[in-house]
Each structure stands twice: as C-alpha cells, then as structure tokens.
Image (cartoon, rainbow, N blue to C red):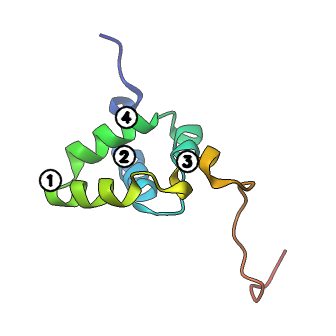
Amino acid sequence: MPQRPSSSLTPADRDRVIQMAWEDRTSFDAIERQFGVTPGEVIQLMRSELKPSSFRMWRERTAGRKTKHVAKRGFEIGRFRCPSQRGN
C-alpha cells in the first residue's frame, strides 16, 4: 500500500493542517497546495485527530461552504487586507 501524504507529515505539519482546516476562510485547495493533502485526506485526518463531537461540528460547518472550495467562491483568491491596515 503506498504511503499517504497525510501520514508522511511531521507532527507540526499535521497540527498546521488541522488549524488551517478548522479556519473557515482557508480553502481545501490552499491546504493541498501547501501540504499535498487532498480534501478527502484532510477529512480523514480531522476524523482521526478530533473528538467525535468536534469532528461532526466541523463537518456540519464546512459541508457546502463556499469558502472551503475555490471553485465555489466566485472570486479570485488573495490575501485579505483591511483598508485601515498599514503597509503594502
């Protein structure tokens, strides 16, 4: 059986993937680009690392959410910058 990308992640990378997946604004595509973990593998990782009630709450929140899927967003991905934020 080939090694899955999510199993080859360091503990710090696994924590970061979980953190990014928990954020509403971070898309699965961004996680895949950065860590090479597909949305299905993110779901498996979340299922194995979270308590069952936390996993169910996360899945209900992310299911069908436009911000978690770039194709559903309808706008270009970029970094959000508040108009009052200093710098470029």
Q: Earlier in the sequence, mark 4 or mark 1?
A: 4
* Residue identifier under label 4: 41
In percent of the image, x 39 and y 52: which residue is there?
Answer: 63
SS at mark 4 in the image = helix
Q: Is label 2 or label 4 in front?
A: 4
Residue type, numbered disc 1 = Pro
* Residue identifier under label 1: 52
Image spot of residue 7 (x, y percent): 33, 31
* Residue identifier under label 3: 69
Q: Earlier in the sequence, mark 2 or mark 1?
A: 2
SS at mark 3 in the image = loop
Which residue is more in the foreground, 74 or 14? 74
* Residue identifier under label 2: 14
Residue type, numbered disc 2 = Arg
In percent of the image, x 33 and y 45: which residue is there?
Answer: 11
Which residue is more in the foreground, 88 or 82? 82
Image spot of residue 73 (x, y percent): 63, 54
